[in-house]
Image: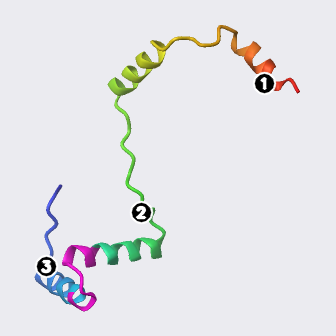
Amino acid sequence: MATIELTPETEALAQRVAAAQRLSVPAAIQRALEAQADAVGVDRRPARRRMTVDEMLAFGAEIAAMPILDPRSANEIMEDLNTP
């Protein structure tokens, strides 16, 4: 993870806010960023990592290697599902 450099003024402010809330500086910064993210509508969920081509091909190969449990065609299965 990259190190974030803060100006001396920002670091001093973070320390004062953390002390006032009886939190560690990282916890105070996180709490402040979460509140700001909520205020501006930023999704706080972690970003999902996209699969690489090699991972997709490996996943496809894994699925293709699975046994076929129902020998009927897709149309036959859909007909059964749609029959009342």
Q: Quadrant of residue 54?
A: top left
Q: Which residue is mark 1?
A: 81
Earlier-in-chain disc, 1 versus 2: 2
Q: Which mark is residue 33?
A: none
Task: Please state the horizontal and vertical placement of residue 21, each as a whole percent of the image.
Answer: 28, 88
The image shows residue 69, relative to residue 8, as above or below, that is above
The image shows residue 6, relative to residue 18, as above or below, that is above
Q: Which residue is mark 3?
A: 7
Determine the CA span between mark 3 and mark 1.
64 Å
* In front: label 3 or label 1: 1
Residue at figure coordinates x 45%, y 72% from the top left: 38
Q: Is residue 21 magenta?
A: yes
Residue type at mark 2 is Arg
Residue type at mark 3 is Thr
Determine the CA span between mark 1 and mark 2.
39 Å
Taking depth in this image into account, of 27 and 67 the one nearest to the observer is 67
Q: Which residue is mark 2?
A: 44
Task: Please state the horizontal and vertical placement of residue 27, each as a whole percent of the image.
Answer: 26, 74
Q: Secondary structure at mark 2?
A: loop
The image shows residue 72, relative to residue 46, as above or below, that is above
Residue at figure coordinates x 30%, y 72% from the top left: 30
Determine the CA span between mark 2 and mark 3.
25 Å
**Which residue range is magenta in the image?**
19-29
Q: Secondary structure at mark 1?
A: helix
Asked whether the beta carbons under mark 2 and mark 3 sit within 8 Å of each other, the answer is no
Q: Is residue 45 magenta?
A: no
Helix, strand or loop: magenta stretch: helix
- Residue 36 left/right relative to 30: right
Earlier-in-chain disc, 3 versus 1: 3
